[in-house]
Amino acid sequence: MNVKRKGSVRISPSLDEAPEITERWVAEADLRRGNKLVRRGRPKLLNARRLLSLRLPPDVIAGWKASGPGWQTRMAQVLEKSTPKGRRNAG
């Protein structure tokens, strides 16, 4: 056995050397169900938005930005309402 190799020496910690379990430790610990890591945070949306590169005239962009925070969401709502009939929800 190569003793200089990192992690090659196995030492069993005694109960006195075990870390104290604090609320912070529990909050930062990985949550697992069996061998599967359970992801935290916001769940993935069923109909998530997709990234699109779109070229628009500068005055159009400036007008939307001037309308204040949330301009991208409002622009998406206007585009959704103007989607041609029969084409909605097409992937």
Image: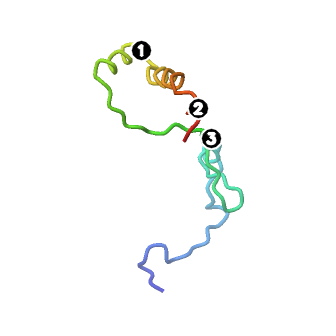
Label 3 element class: loop
Front label number (3 vs 1):
3
Q: Which is more N-terminal, label 1 or label 3?
A: 3
Q: Residue furthest front?
A: 86
Spatial CA distance of label 1 from label 2 is: 32 Å
Query: Which residue carries the number 3 mark?
Result: 46
First of labels 1, 2 by sequence position: 1
Residue 11 in the image, given as x and y percentages of width and height: 57, 73
- Point out the residue furthest to the left here: 58
Front-lying residue, 11 or 61: 61
Task: Estimate the x, y position of residue 13 in percent, counting from the top left.
Answer: 61, 67
The residue under label 1 is 68
Give yes or no for contact between labels 3 and 1 (Cβ–Cβ under 8 Å): no
| Crowd rating for badge 1 (residues with CA inside 10 Å; few <14, some 14–19, many 20+) | few
The amino acid type of the residue labelled 3 equals: Leu
Residue situated in front as seen by the camera: 58 or 11: 58
Residues packed near mark 2 inside 10 Å, few (<14), some (14 to 19) or many (20 plus): few
Residue that badge 2 annotates: 86
Determine the residue positioned at 61% across, 55% down.
19
Label 3 crowd (10 A; few <14 / some 14-19 / many >=20): few
Q: Residue furthest bottom?
A: 1
